Image: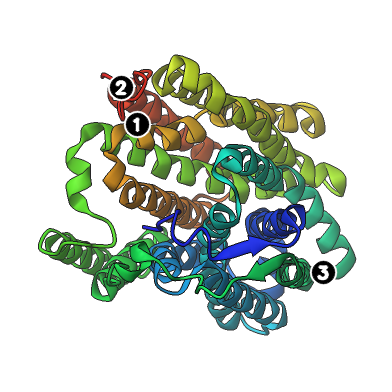
Amino acid sequence: MTHMSTASDALGARSFPLAISSLAIIGFVSVLVGTVTSMALTTLSGAFGASTSVIVWVTTAYLLAAGLTLPVAGWAVDRFGARPVLLVGVGIFAVGSLASGLANSIELLLLSRALQGLGGGVLEPACLALISRITERQRIGTVMGVMAAVINIAPAVGPLVGAALLSWTGWQGVFFFAVPPVIVAVLLLAVSLRRHEASDASGDDTAKAEQLDAAGLALLGVGFAALLLAFAQVGEDTLWLAAIAGVGGVVLLAAYVRRALRIDEPVVNPRLFMDRKFSGAVAIMGAGGVLTFSVLTLAPMLAERVWNLEGIAFAMPLGAFGLGMLVSMSISGAVSDRIGPRPIVTVGAAGAAVCLAGLAVLTPGLTAPAITGPLLLGVTGVAFGTVSAPTFASIYRILPRASVGRGTTAALIAVQLGAALGVTSIGALIDALGDVAFVVVPALLAVIMFAVAVIARFTLPVRASAGSPAGPV
């Protein structure tokens, strides 16, 4: 969606390290927010008197808004330039963060989190576009590697940050903390960048910027939100609402597909899914979103309600999962370049399935949970960390160069919507099943990861030949 090479000469850096550091801070905080907020869900449930199925919408509202902002962000960067879009995104993100911390009702909190998500969804694509425009071509791989390393630390340190904020500032600090660093980063960015006379959004590519499919975006967003509402009613007495929301969601999504097949530039192009390798990659990415945010939601509740962990021990299970992901993600991309994505994703997903099945079996009578809980989730994180990065990279091998932008946007949307689906379903299951859900949910996630292993085995490409966009199947 975003033309990464647009107007690369329109911006320069007075201090390149300072500019990259500023963008890394923004990216880091935007990812950190998700992990930190997940640590506060139980506290928020008590503060607002909300059930688990309602309070998880604190996460769902953010994910849904951020996911549907991705195509808008790509279009806006092409149309207006990376720097102004980043500034608007930071502004919306900061306002949403402040409003979330000041909310005095669950309704206001959910609206504020959606606003924060609208801004958060802009930050990553705008940061990446801006990096590409101030970085020399021969350095882009190194710079992107540094950015990825910094951002991937967030899931590992997030639980500790969240536990500290809850202890020192209460739940309000979980939302307020994000504002100062992003504002400082924007100020440093203003100092470190120099503006040439040419517009940041100038150039032939931007002159041909695609028209935003607003109607399609509305159908996709409202349709998926309706399906999430239907899932949220599991175990409730309002089955009529679940039925209406479910049918309405299916109808709206069907209308989106019909529209998307009749226009040239839809938000997500259904024609791309005719390639089974691409369909498999997006399915794996979506399942990865389900798993990641399911664990982010489940682990703190499991630590508190089942394992009775407190203080730093309360943060350790989720922290171990994030650390495990960080370790394996840092090497899985390079390994997949040598042996191909298929074997590493297949083995990693199968390993994650085994670990999650073990978690389901062992959770009720777990001995020394302060040690064994983090160990189980840490090994799960190591296994799962080998899934997402090689799969995402495989899209560049699978699709023709002209379709890569659309394909990566579709994959990122799948991650966000999959995450929203996972979080919403977990909230409904916990309300419906009580503590039994802490056994059922890991078991369901194990089944999903086993399915991912099967999909990877039969759809992902083996190692691509030099100069070929896609390897043989």
Q: Vertically, is 86 above or below 356?
A: below
Residue 98 figure quarter = bottom right
Q: Vertically, is 191 above or below 395?
A: below
Residue 398 rendering spot, x and y as whole percentages: 30, 33
Could you tell me the amino acid type at mark 3? Answer: Gly
In the figure, is residue 152 to the left or right of 56?
right
In the figure, is residue 448 to the left or right of 304?
left
Q: On the rendered image, what quadrant is the N terminus found in?
A: bottom left
In the figure, is residue 55 to the left or right of 72?
right
Q: Earlier in the sequence, mark 1 or mark 3?
A: 3
- Residue that carries the numbered disc 1 in the rendered image: 397
| SS for callout 3 | loop
For the rendered model, the colour scheme is rainbow
Q: Which residue is pictured at 53% across the width and 28% down the height?
A: 333
In the figure, is residue 87 to the left or right of 121?
right
Residue contact between numbered discs 1 and 2, judged by CB atoms under 8 Å:
yes
Q: Earlier in the sequence, mark 2 or mark 3?
A: 3
- Residue that carries the numbered disc 3 in the rendered image: 170
Q: Which residue is pictured at 50% across the width and 41% down the height?
A: 291
Q: Which residue is pictured at 39% across the width and 30% down the height?
A: 452
**Which of the two marks, 1 or 3, is nearer to us in this view?**
1
- Residue that carries the numbered disc 2 in the rendered image: 471
Between 124 and 79, the one lying in front of the other is 79
Residue contact between numbered discs 2 and 3, judged by CB atoms under 8 Å:
no
Residue 5 figure quarter = bottom left
Residue 466 rendering spot, x and y as whole percentages: 37, 20
Q: Earlier in the sequence, mark 1 or mark 2?
A: 1
Could you tell me the amino acid type at mark 1? Answer: Arg
